[in-house]
Image (cartoon, rainbow, N blue to C red):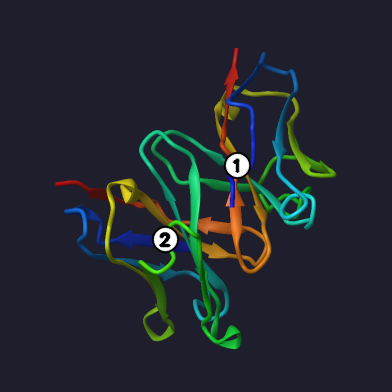
Amino acid sequence: QSALTQPPSASGSPGQSVTISCTGTSSDVGGYNYVSWYQQYPGKAPKLIIFEVSKRPSGVPDRFSGSKSGNTASLIVSGLQAEDEAEYYCSSYAGSNNFVFGTGTKVTVL
Amino acid sequence: EVQLVESGGGLVQPGGSLRLSCATSGFTFSDPYMDWVRQAPGKGLEWVGRIKNKAGSYTANYAASVKGRFTISRDDSKNSLYLQMNSLKNEDTAVYYCARDAHTAMDYWGQGTLVTVSS
């Protein structure tokens, strides 16, 4: 199972929006509405911020949203804040009780 | 409050074995599936495997990179998850996280434990 493809980096100024793509195949992203997104600060554990493509866990700001089209999912961070500077990973169910993660995207707030 | 605390990491020689533990609290451990995820130094996340609950016959599934070498188990009476790692390779060096599996995503994570495979 190959890792999902994400851009290595993305950036935006405070208040702007940034979109991170996550490209897989019809066997993972395209085949299931089970894409999730995780935020990770350096030296810390990942935190779930989006599940099932577009659902937010309790406590996650609505500045974070998700979508999917075909084999590509996207995370949109609106109204960018300094605290949003982190690494972001997508993940997808890949069938047969397997999961696959994305390559990760470093978001920089300019 | 949901808590997951990994332990058991350390330095091991190639070909050696190590057993990681994940102690949990704050939820009914016997209910959810549980996962292990690892992260090599400076690299991305890699799913290691998942174990189902009793209703799922405690079935475990593994990533191809660890299948046949790693074994996931759980003790519901001790609210604990385990990862037995055998035939360790240099490329298994990573921080290992346990995570609660909400079937479609991993909703709570431990802080991780570092495993270093080196001679």
Q: Residue B77: x and y, percent? A: 40, 86
The answer to whether residue A109 is above or below residue B8 is: above
In the figure, is residue A99 to the left or right of A15?
left
1 or 2: mark nearer the eye: 2
Residue identified by numbered label 1: A102
Say if labels 1 and 2 share a chain: no
| Residue B66's disc number | 2
Question: What residue lies at 44% left-to-right and 62% top-to-bottom?
Answer: B3
- Determine whether A110 is above or below A82 in the image: above
The quarter holding residue A12 reads: top right
> Residue B9 or B80: which is nearer the viewer?
B9
The amino acid type, in three-letter code, at marker 2 is Val
Q: Residue A90 carries which label?
A: none
**Which residue occupies the foreground of this view, A18 or A97?**
A97
B40 to the left or right of A88: left
The numbered mark 1 sits on a residue in which chain? A
**In the picture provided, is B72 more to the left or to the right than A91?**
left
Q: Relative to B78, is B49 on the left or the right?
A: right
The amino acid beneath tag 1 is Gly
Instruction: Identify the residue at image location x=53%, y=64%.
Output: B100
Classify A23 as above or below B81: above
Q: As drawn, which residue projects farthest toward the left?
A: B119
Q: State which chain disc 2 sits on.
A: B
Provide residue A59's location: percent of width, then percent of height. Answer: 66, 48
Q: Position of residue A76 (x, y in %)?
A: 75, 32
Residue at the (62%, 68%) spot, across then down = A97
The picture quadrant where one finds residue A13 is top right
Looking at the rendered structure, the secondary structure element under dot 1 is loop
Can residue B46 be seen here? The reply is yes
State which quarter of the image contains the C terminus of chain A. Answer: top right
